[in-house]
Image (spheres, rainbow, N blue to C red):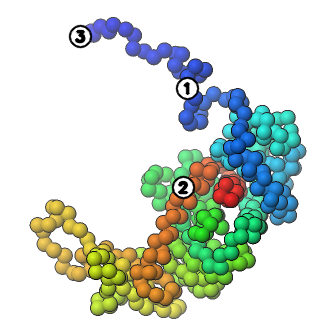
Amino acid sequence: MVKKQKKDSRKSLDSKRFNASCGRARKINASTAVATCREQLSPFGGLLGLLKLLDIFDFKNNFEEFYVAPQRETKLGDYSMVLGIVLLMFIGFNRIWHFVYIRLESMLCGIFGVRELPAVSTYWRYLDSMGINQAHSILRIMSRLREQAWKICGIKHSRIAIDIDTTVETIYGGQQGGRIGHNPRNRGKKGYRPVLCFIEQTREYLYGKLRKGETVSGEETAKVIHTFKDHLPSCVQKVLLRADAEFMSWASVEAALDEGYDFIFANKQCEPPFDPKNWYRPLQREEAQFNSCLYKPFGWKQVCRFVAMRIPKKPKEDEKLTQSELFEEDQYTYRIFCTNLNGNAHEVIDTYDKRADAENLIGEAKQEGLDAIPSGKFKNNYAFFQIAMLAYNLWRY
């Protein structure tokens, strides 16, 4: 049977190409028309404030003192090339090829003293010449900026908390270092698994590294903990480390003890024997119970303190008519932590729960440009990772 239609339902070809009368695109993608910006950047959008901040921190001299220049020489110099990428992220772009939109921007051209910014390929080639040495030098630059920022702002924290966490950067190509690992949003896809460490009091990035998409080992965590002392401000005397169960191992505990740090690590590897008579409630109206004990897991060199929290399981509607749990342990959900802190167990766990804000900081860093994977070479992505975190810290300051 043939059906007749009153009009042609096929889409017009005009709707498939760029139309100037259409509204502005909300997101830049492969189909976005390539052109320069017609509107000028606002001087009150934060860019001039950033330049003033860089002058206060004497950023250029600090950069030239600590930065390890790659072999490639550029006409504008290393400082202008790295600062250009930082300003690109600070404006709101996180891809190198987004320079095509701001090459003729008068404010940016005035900052660098040129009529137009270099071509996108120039920034690509410079990023291709960067590697691990440049990434480590950018970390030293951030340490100097942190020391100056704390002195200028009058920040004198003698005790700080460092939150250690990992995130997943999904990759969709053949980039070096990509591995199939824990990726809840894109299961089965390759990705990187960087480590990020934030200071709770100032919410700034302290240390981190881009990693292959594999679970963090205890030896690698120990190396990260030993590195903190090179990046802490001089006024810091006591440090509290907080991390989830991924970082729990004797190597990480031993590293924290060697450096004199306090620590709270979540535990999912061992089952300490808690005395059933020592469970208590800080408030009678609360359902959660707390306990603590001293325990030496297999392979560890000394006894450590473990604290626990258990919450009664709420049975589902279809489970109310079934038989109850045979063992008492099956009726609760447990949270167990390894720590060297004294005090009540519920106070230690409350201190650990403040670590949840690290997820928000990681989300902010991803919006700054951490999710961008600009190159197929791992060394280039490693350097770009630290540049993105430098832009994040400048934005935080």
Which of the labelled discs sits on residue 278, or is there none? none
Q: Earlier in the sequence, mark 3 or mark 2?
A: 3
Residue 96, placed above or below residue 56: above
- Judging by the rendered image, the residue that carries numbered circle 2 is 363
In the rendered structure, are the residues bearing label 1 and label 3 in contact, judged by CB atoms less than 8 Å apart? no
Real-space CA distance between mark 1 and mark 2, rounded to the nearest whole angstrom = 29 Å
The secondary element bearing badge 2 is classed as helix
- Quadrant the C terminus occupies: bottom right
In the displayed orientation, state which residue is furthest to the left. 321
Label 2 neighbour load within 10 Å: few <14, some 14-19, many 20+ = few
- Residue at image position (83%, 52%) is 78
x and y percentages locating residue 16 in the rendered image: 53, 21
Please report the residue visible at 28 percent of the width from the left and 77 percent of the height from the top. 285
Q: Is residue 345 above or below residue 47?
A: below
Where residue 385 appears, as percent x and y from the top left, is: 66, 56
Residue 110 image position (x, y, % from top left): 83, 40
Residue name at image x 60 percent, y 30 percent: 32
Mark 3 highlights which residue? 1
Q: Amino acid at mark 1?
A: Gly
Q: Give the residue type at disc 3.
A: Met
Task: Specify whether 181 is left or right of 232.
Answer: left
Q: Which mark is residue 23?
A: 1
